[in-house]
Each structure stands twice: as structure tokens, then as C-alpha cells.
Image (cartoon, coloured by chain):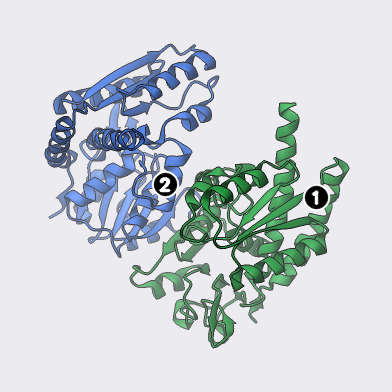
Chain colours: A blue, B green
Amino acid sequence: MTTIMKGAEVAARMREALERDLAALRRRNIEPKLAIVRVGSRPDDLAYERGALKRFEGLGIAAQVFEFPETVDQESFAAAFAGIDASPDVHGILLFRPLPKHLDEEAIKKAIDPLKDVDGMSPLSAAKVFSGAEDGFAPCTPSAVMEMLDHYDLDPAGKNVVVVGRSMVVGRPLAMLMLMRNATVTICHTKTRNMEEICKRADIVVAAAGKARMLSPAFVSEKSAVVDVGINVEDGKLCGDVDYDVVAPQVSMISPVPGGVGAVTTSVLAKHVLKAADLLNRRRTNFA
Amino acid sequence: MTTIMKGAEVAARMREALERDLAALRRRNIEPKLAIVRVGSRPDDLAYERGALKRFEGLGIAAQVFEFPETVDQESFAAAFAGIDASPDVHGILLFRPLPKHLDEEAIKKAIDPLKDVDGMSPLSAAKVFSGAEDGFAPCTPSAVMEMLDHYDLDPAGKNVVVVGRSMVVGRPLAMLMLMRNATVTICHTKTRNMEEICKRADIVVAAAGKARMLSPAFVSEKSAVVDVGINVEDGKLCGDVDYDVVAPQVSMISPVPGGVGAVTTSVLAKHVLKAADLLNRRRTNFA
């Protein structure tokens, strides 16, 4: 029997810990708050924003959307962003990317207070994830993969883990999180030869290639645990990077799309905001 | 017949390009200079320093040693370091690490001008290597491995590369340099199971474990190219992480220790200083 790794179950379990941490923060008179910064109104961003707002409302954590027109100029946007970043009420910032081409995304990424960088977009956050530092924020999606493994008692230590995809939002940071947890990690990508064979040998395969249903039964064995990070739209329907219907019966564990990793990312975002609120408050106390 | 990858041959070939680049900088009235910053006088540091000074003298590139007593306090050292970093005559800084425990190494690493960070020690340099940016400096040793592969026409693209070791000075940055060059990369470490099997399957194995002669014939096949980054001392003799005498006859290519990667690192340091001098001068010109 294949175990289906359900995002909703992971989120439900995380909820208990989040409520406990939130209560602990409130006892210290800290009211955590997320700022969502959006330029323009891409449908993907709006969908994610709705999901995040719903999750935060359900948890009782404040979240405020800061919306800018797509035509905002660099100077105004940078100044507004700096204001949000400096606000003592804001403990975490989620910035939708990519920004419109006329804006300097790298400058904004560098400007964010590392302690408020709850989606791990700054170079300093990347360096912390790369070096395995405990106090850095990885982007939410790779962190959600780790939450999923933990919930289903799949300890990556000593296991052979293959990450398919090498993006800075999923593949690379995920490889580093796996390494921190003592997995033996292989990173595959479009230039990889014999990828089927490499994936088939792995204990855990994470598909983050951004290519609909590329992972076929030839990539797995009956011992495989498969985590699907892909979010693709085919004929108006959401599908992952795994050819789920034919792969699921062949493996020991698998996460579906939708209903898998994607259902965990906003819980991770909340977790990061609570952690940021804690760290920011300790920093302030130390300075006082 | 096993091809022996000789560091001296790589360094000799690099010398031609370095002399050409140096001449081009001088035509722009730029006289590149390395600052070597040393606290105390560990024998390892002194040996590397002698090698670097000799290499730079041979190339006609300036190098100046800034020596501090082991007892220097944080405030004085940070101020002196800032002065060296700010000096317009200095284009690159090599800082011997680890610093004595009473000094704040992280603060110094963060303070360095990223363009002068020729040994890739700062978080910003790490982030650039992690993300695959072309303008960041990786530490000299992993860069030397890439120079060696290039010299021996071993293109990592599409190849299976195993890096044994996950340090921030060799293993992790090397994995990212390999990824930039389109290798399929696996990172192994002390918690890896079936390491022999994983290494045996690889086209290229880089040993950076810091464990004398751990890589035995069981880790290789006749098609393997083996690069040995280890520098260990046994009975007063230098030896690598590869059990060279028994492994060399079994593989297609191998680098010895001494006389392998270690003989290339100071040439890489020189290459980075010339690149830094070029980038710094362009930055100044842009600001003028």
C-alpha cells in the first residue's frame, strides 16, 4: 500500500505547534505580523496571497497586503519597501517575485532585514542556508518539503536523496537542507544523463523541475518516497512534475498535487513569521 | 595508462594567461596587489604564505604581508583590517583562518569588500557561488580543482561527479562550481552509507574529506578521474585523501599529493587578484 503524504495533515499537525508558539509570543506582548508586498496583480500571486491570508486568519496571525501598481518607479518602491522593512510592527516580509523588469530586484533583496526575510530571498539568507546555519530562513517551499518528511517520519539522515531541479527557490536550498539533515544528496537537472537510473536508486526523490509529469514510473522503485514540488497547469488543471496516476501505485510514499507540498508552504510561512518575531524581539532586547 | 594530473603543468599554462591579463591591467595604469593578513604564525599559514609570495614574485604581482600578534584585540584588529580593506592600493585580501578564538571571525568576514574577497570567505561571496553568479569569488581550492579539470580537458557537463566532503572551503562551493558547469553532483560525507558504491559509479570523484588515504581502490573504476584535495600529514610526510599508490593504477586520471591541486591554488589566488583589480577599477570609473 502506497502512503499518500497529504499536505493538509502536515498543516494540521503544524497548527498545534504554531498556536503554542503564538501564545508564548503574546505572553511576551509580541503580536506577530506578516507584510505581503505585491507589485501588480498576477493571478498566481493573487491565488497564493488568498491562501496565505486564509491560513494566517485561521491561525489568528496578522497579515497585511501592501499593493503597488505595476508601473511604480524604483525610487518610490525602494523607499516604500524600506519603510515596511523598518516598521517595528512588521516581523516578516513576503515579496512576490519576479518584480517588473524596470525594478531592481537584486537591490530590494539585499535591502531586507535578514531577520524579516521569512521567504529566504536575500543573499545573506542564501549564504546561511548554504553554510547550514540554524538561524537563516530557507524559502518556504523547500522548508515545506522537510516538514512533510518529518511528519511522515522519513528521516533523511544517511539516505540517498535526489533533487531534480537546481533553482534558487527550490532545488539548491532543498539540497542544502537535506545535507544539514545528513542526507547524501544528488542534484539533477536538464543536463543530467541517465536521470532515470539515478532517481530509481534513490530512497527519496524530490521533483522540482517545473515540467509537467516528467517523472514516470521508470524513475522509481517500490522503496521510493516521491515528493512532488511541481505546480504546472495542463488544460486548465493543476498537475505536478510527477505522472501521479501511474507512479503512485509503484512507490512506497508519494505526495499528490494539489494537496501535497503546496498545502504546507503557508504554514511554513507562518512558522517563519513567529520565529522572526521571536528573533527580532530578542535583538531589540539585547540592544536596549 | 593512467594520466597523472600535475599541478605544475596547470600552473604553467595559467601563467601565460595571467601574464597577459597583468600586462592589460598595466596598460590601464593598474598595479594589482594582494594583502595577506595573518594573525599569529601557525606553521601551515607560514608555509602557504611562502608559496604565495614566491608565486606572486614569479608573476611580478605585488603582495604584502600584514602580520598581527596572536594577542591582538578585536577593536585594533577590526580597525586595521578595515584600513587594509579600504586602501585603494589593495585589490585582494587573503586572511588566514581560523582566527584566534577571542576575535570575531564572522564580523571580519562580513566586513570585507566583496570585490576584494579573493578567497571567497564572506557570506556575499558564498551566496554568489551558491546561486551560480559569475562575478563572485569561490575559495581558491575548489577553483583550483576546476582549473585542473579544464587543463586536462575533462568537461564536467553531463558527467556524474561525486564530491566527498561538505566543508564551506571545499566541498560545498566545489559542488556549486560543478553544478554551474552542468555536472550532476552528489555530495557525500561522514554520514553517507554505501559510499564506495556511489563513488565507483562516478565519472569524477573529488576527495575532500580531510582523512588520510580514505579513498581506496574499492571507490573507483577504470573510467574514474580522481582529484585529491586532501592535505594530511602522516609520519611527517604529506599525503592526500586518496591511497595513491594502490588507486592510481586502477583509474584513468588522478592528481597526486603533493604536486596536484595544492600547486594550483596560488595561481588561482593570482587570477582572482587580477580579476578583482579589474572589477574594482571598473567600479571606480563608474562612480567617477
Query: Residue visible at 46% across and 41% down?
Result: A124
- Mark 1 closeness class: few <14, some 14–19, many ≥20 residues within 10 Å: some
Q: Residue furthest right?
A: B27
Which quadrant of the figure has residue B194? bottom left
Write down the residue under mark 1.
Answer: B21
Of residue A218 and residue A286, the one placed in the foreground of this image is A286
According to the picture, the residue beneath numbered tag 2 turns out to be A128
**Residue type, mark 2 in image:** Lys
Where, by quadrant of the figure, is residue B37 drawn? bottom right
Circle count: 2
Front position in the image: B150 or B15: B15
Residue contact at pointers 2 and 1, CB within 8 angstroms: no
| For residue A272, above or below residue B254 | above
Amino acid at dot 1: Asp
Q: Residue at x 65, y 44 (%)?
A: B83
Quadrant in the picture for residue A23: top left
Q: Chain of mark 1?
A: B
A113 vs B229, left or right, is left
Query: Which of these two is toward me, B71 or B145?
Result: B71
